[in-house]
Image (cartoon, rainbow, N blue to C red):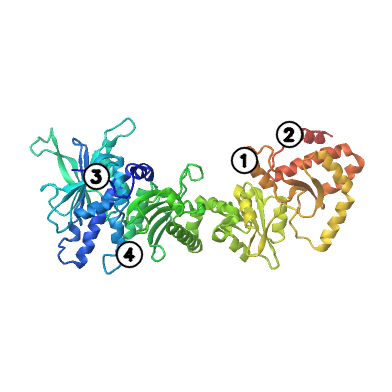
Amino acid sequence: MAKKQFKTESKKLLDMMINSIYTHKEIFLRELISNASDAIDKLYFRSLTDGSVSLNRGDYEIRLVPDKAARTLIVRDNGCGMTKEELESNLGTIAKSGSFDFKKEGAVGGEEVDIIGQFGVGFYSAFMVSEKITVISRAYGAEEAWKWESSGVDGYTIEPAGENELEHNGTLVKLALRPDTDDEKYSEFLEEYRLRALVSKYSDYVRYPIRMMVKKSRRREDSPEDKPEYEDYLEDETLNRMTPIWKKPRTEVKDEEYAAFYEEQFRDFEAPLKVIRQKTEGVSDYTALLFIPASAPYNYYSRDYEKGLRLYSSGVLIMDKCAELLPDYFSFVRGLVDSADLSLNISREMLQHDRQLKHIAKALETKIGDELKAMLENERDKYKTFYKAFGTQLKYGLYADYGMHKAALQDLVMFESSASDEPTTLGEYVSRMKEGQKKIFYAAGESREQASLLPRVEAVVGKGFEVLYLLEDVDEFALMMLHEYGGHEFSNVMTDELDLDSDEEKESLKLENEKSKDLFDFMKEAIGGEVSAVRFTNTLSGHPVCISSEGAVSTNMEKTLGRMPGAENGIKAEKILEINRDHPIAGRLKTLFIEDKEKLKDYSRILCASARLISGLSIENPSEVADLITGLMLN
């Protein structure tokens, strides 16, 4: 019989589909099972309005038949089948989709029906593993079956099938697998364990049973109990679960079932903190089942971690981790999205431009944010557990993309505070602000204790103001990007921005600093470039000195940036040595400036080193400082 050529596409197009559209060869089984499910769907929907179709839904099945000796794999269904003309149309034209046409036309009452995929492109993925494909199909009610056969780009043949090749309606797809090579072991697709794994991975929730005869072992009845003998036998087994948990009514699923599903599917040993279900119809029809973990994976804050949700099309897995569905700041969320609006054949490149997917991602972002806010307000202890694991990621989200996401995240972040041992939100801080307070005060430190003991913090808290403690590297950068909250700007108490004095106090301090200019110039020169200025202050309570900063870069930012690779000569803060005007050390310095300038040099270096230590900064030459202290003790 003369071969026919594929109607509208070239050999090059077929080659591109086989080698470019699909990343993994194993995807062929998903496509063939999806096509089989479509064929059953068509016949089932037809039965709803056509009394001549007598099959019940429980009669339908998809069957896998591997044959190692013949190196063939059969995927068979008892769905609607195809006529000769439909075989020609659906398989003879690359990317022609009978299922897609059926879905657009509507099968029941003019409404769209839920059809998984399409013949066309998906079917031809089977050529990745097959050197020849035979399709035998009998349309429901037809007396004759037809055989379509092709070895790929060289065309195809169509002829009547033999009497015994297909005795009932449906379609049989027979793959003659390619020979094994050093790089590819095509025979693995004949192994029971491999087929079982592929069905579980991609087609576990196809709504019809996928069956296969599997090998079992049992004890021979006539064998003695002390020396039992065993025999192998074949048993028909359903490989898929069919009904996904996310399609069951909410009232029928217990918390324990969600936890078991999560732990099994996402390899976690803890139940999730929160389960989020969302079903949306309208612009995009989809169902989402999301989980917020109780703790972070070991590699969460590393480059090895991959974010993303599983993406399904009508229960058939398209992608294991679709990163486009989650923003980075919600990358801790695990779960899945199932949408009949998405094509099985969608590629990573197509995903980046898919409008439906972008709409789903935006809706999920809003839903996750709302659920976290509800947890914060109504389940505080649970939220604290969540925040301990993933709060840092929310702060990175505030800082990322020039603060574009602050509206979504600013009410979710928390900080330690001088007002309580419990972490606080920005909204809670503002609700406690003193009358007339204009700014939100904060101080950065390596621990709560260190931050609380900073000289200026004690002074600010002593005047009745609350101070936020920023204990993570990202904190100050996040607040800098946020800039303000509720109309109140953020103010670092360890910078020159701190302004708690009355006009009279400011004027008095200004005059004192002007009078002591020569003293400060001498001390600055003695210190040797570690500070840009020396001055008196009245913001230190009982402490003698501190290091403050001016400009955009604080001392804490300098420490953080200095820990980054290649930052040996990086950005430095403009440091100021501040001396408590009301402390006895101030009078001592004035006296030394008149009576003993050499000793004043030693005092200046010791005071600077002390101030650096209080601020959590390192000392470049601790031996020198120790010698200076020892020398003063001996004199």
Q: Amino acid at mark 1?
A: Met
Considering only order in the chain, which callout, 2 or 4, is on the residue closer to the N terminus?
4
Question: Residue 425 is drawn in which quadrant?
Answer: bottom right
- Residue 617 in percent (x, y) is at 69, 42
Mark 2 lies on residue: 621
Tag 2 and tag 1, C-beta contact below 8 Å: no
**Residues under labels 4 and 2: Cα distance?**
69 Å
Task: State the CA–CA distance, disc 1 to disc 3.
Answer: 62 Å
User: Where does residue 214 sit, x and y in percent of width and height?
Assistant: 19, 43
Amino acid at pointer 2: Asn
Q: Nearer the viewer, mark 2 or mark 1?
A: 1
Going from N to C along the chain, the mark reached first, 4 or 3, is 3
Any part of residue 208 in sight: no
Residue 254 in view of the camera: yes
| Type of the residue with mark 4 | Thr
Q: Of label 2 and label 1, which has the lower sequence position?
A: 1
Q: Residue 116: horizontal and vertical position, in percent?
A: 31, 56
Judge by depth and name the residue closer to the eye, 252 or 123: 123
Q: Position of residue 629 (x, y in %)?
A: 78, 36
What residue lies at 87% left-to-right and 54% top-to-bottom? 512
Q: CA distance from mark 1 to mark 4?
A: 51 Å
How far is mark 2 from mark 1, CA to CA?
A: 22 Å
Q: Give SS at disc 2.
A: loop
Disc sitting over residue 28 in the figure: none
Provide the residue designation for mark 3: 156
